[in-house]
Amino acid sequence: MEPQTKRSLAPPLKAADHVNDGKHHLLLAATGSVATIKIPNIVEALAKYDNLSIRILLSESASKFLQGQSFEQPCLATIAKMKNVDGIYHDEDEWRKPWVRGDSILHIELRRWADLMVIAPLSANSLAKLALGLSDNLISSVVRAWDATGMIDQARPGVPLPYDGKKGIIVAPAMNTAMWHHPLTAEHMRRLSETWSVDNGGWFEVLRPIEKELACGDTGSGAMHDWKLIVTAIESRFRLTVTHDVTKDLDSGAQRASE
């Protein structure tokens, strides 16, 4: 039953079919950190925009945080029904069936489709993968195949790209304080936040961790950037504006909360 459930949440994707939909395309990814539970908050906050399409990518460990354990940890089927969510993808969706010539390649189609990718949270393990160019799962494969030069993926009609005509990747690292202060983390961060930064003509924007009490009980740096500010960053990069009556969304949200 589990493979069927996941398959139903990951519809086939051909980026070319969505070129003229007039929507901003957001890949919202999460890797192995408890901060994954903020994904529903981010999606809900973006529900007021009609011109937005979201596809969610979850690493194997990240999906364990969204299994319906609590109100703040809804199951994936519930998240899939949230406004603007057009699919939830896992590693196994890349290989649902044996590949034959002519079949699409999921991580390439996801990259072609996306205008912006946001990885929130980005775990220490996944940070290392990105910095070293590893691509052993769906999320890291999308990142490894990203158009870092801005010469391959062009803007779609009426939908400007977020970084001076280029696509980009926003990352919000989240990890234990000791991991955050580890010299390897500093080395990996330099690549993303300096060498490959959008400010230097690159394709990464880093939203640095904040200091607070962590899930492990420690207090210190390493907690994911405030999810509300992550939403603000997405709104800013896409220049999103409300085009419908948001009071209807607020009313329906209040009704769901009372049920």
Image (spheres, rainbow, N blue to C red):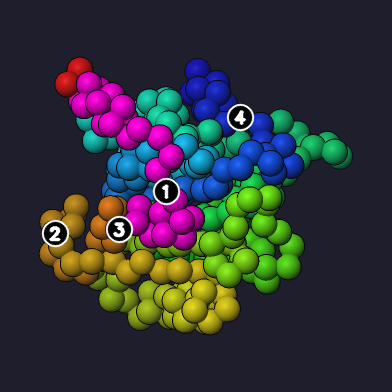
Q: Quadrant of residue 149?
A: bottom right
Q: Pick whichever of labels 1 and 3 is earlier in the sequence.
A: 3
Q: Which mark is residue 62?
A: none
Q: Mark 2 or mark 1, which is nearer to you?
A: 1
Secondary structure under tag 4 reads: loop
Instruction: Describe residue 45's horizontal placement relative to residue 88 as left or right.
Output: left
Q: Amino acid at mark 1?
A: Thr
Residue 206 appears in the rendering: yes
Q: Which mark is residue 229?
A: 3
**Marks 3/2: CA–CA distance:** 18 Å
Secondary structure under tag 1 reads: loop
Residue appearing at x 72%, y 37% in the figure: 17
Q: Quadrant of residue 171?
A: bottom left
Task: Classify mark 4: residues with Cα within 10 Å, few (<14), some (14-19) or many (20+).
Answer: few
Q: Which residues are magenta?
A: 229-257
Q: Which of the pair 222/147 is nearer the observer? A: 147
Residue appearing at x 68%, y 50% in the figure: 157
Q: Mark 3 or mark 2, which is nearer to you?
A: 3
Disc 4 and disc 1 in contact, CB within 8 angstroms? no
Q: Which mark is residue 241?
A: 1
Residue 256 rendering spot, x and y as whole percentages: 25, 22
Q: Please say if 153 is above or below 59.
A: below
**Marks 2/4: CA–CA distance:** 38 Å
Q: Pick whichever of labels 2 and 4 is earlier in the sequence.
A: 4
**Seen from this angle, which residue lies furthest right?**
101
Residue 136 appears in the rendering: no
Q: Which mark is residue 11?
A: 4
Secondary structure under tag 3 reads: helix
Disc 2 and disc 1 in contact, CB within 8 angstroms? no
Q: Mark 1 or mark 3, which is nearer to you?
A: 1
Where is mark 2, residue-wise?
A: 213
